[in-house]
Amino acid sequence: MAVIINFQCKKCRKVFDCDVGLVDVDEKTFRPLFGKKIVCPGCGERSLEDVFLTELGQSQLTTATLDFDDDELDFDDVDEEDDIITVTSPGGTSRWRLEACAGGEK
């Protein structure tokens, strides 16, 4: 399955689309895991630390990790002490850390 994510290379500053393959989320770090390497057309293979995720890329990543209908969503567990929610969708199980919003409320 091709998942296209838009990045900007920190080295050459070029904005580019990259087929990252399947997308998953590391349950410990909550960082994305890609099935394929990130490759800048100008600089070659890049790590996640070597690129910025553009605004478009953020939307694409959200769509790739939350690809489900609302009626298919199951909140399995809410850990209020650590502010972590476990969600199961047809694409798999994900754990998300709840962050404070601008008003300071969760």
Image (cartoon, rainbow, N blue to C red):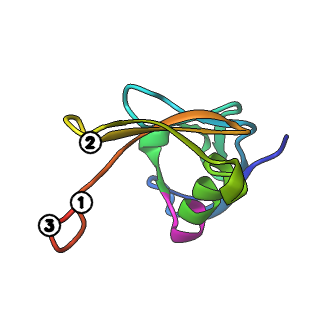
| Mark 2 to mark 3 CA distance (whole Å) | 14 Å
Residue for badge 2? 83
Magenta includes 78? no
Residue 32: where, in percent of width, then height? 52, 39
The reply to whether residue 36 is visible in this rendering is yes
Q: Quadrant of the C terminus?
A: bottom left
Who's the residue at 44% across and 54% down the image? 10
Who's the residue at 25% across and 66% down the image? 101
Q: Residues within 10 Å of mark 1 (few under 14, many from 20)?
A: few
Q: Is residue 94 left or right of residue 83?
A: right
Q: Quadrant of the N terminus?
A: top right
Nearest to N terminus: mark 2 or mark 3: 2
Give the magenta range.
Answer: 53-57
Amino acid type at circle 2 is Asp
Residue for badge 3? 104
Residue for badge 1? 106
The reply to whether residue 40 is visible in this rendering is no
Q: Decide whether the magenta segment is chiefly helix, strand or loop.
A: helix
Amino acid type at circle 1 is Lys
Q: Residue furthest bottom?
A: 103
Q: Is residue 10 left or right of residue 46?
A: left
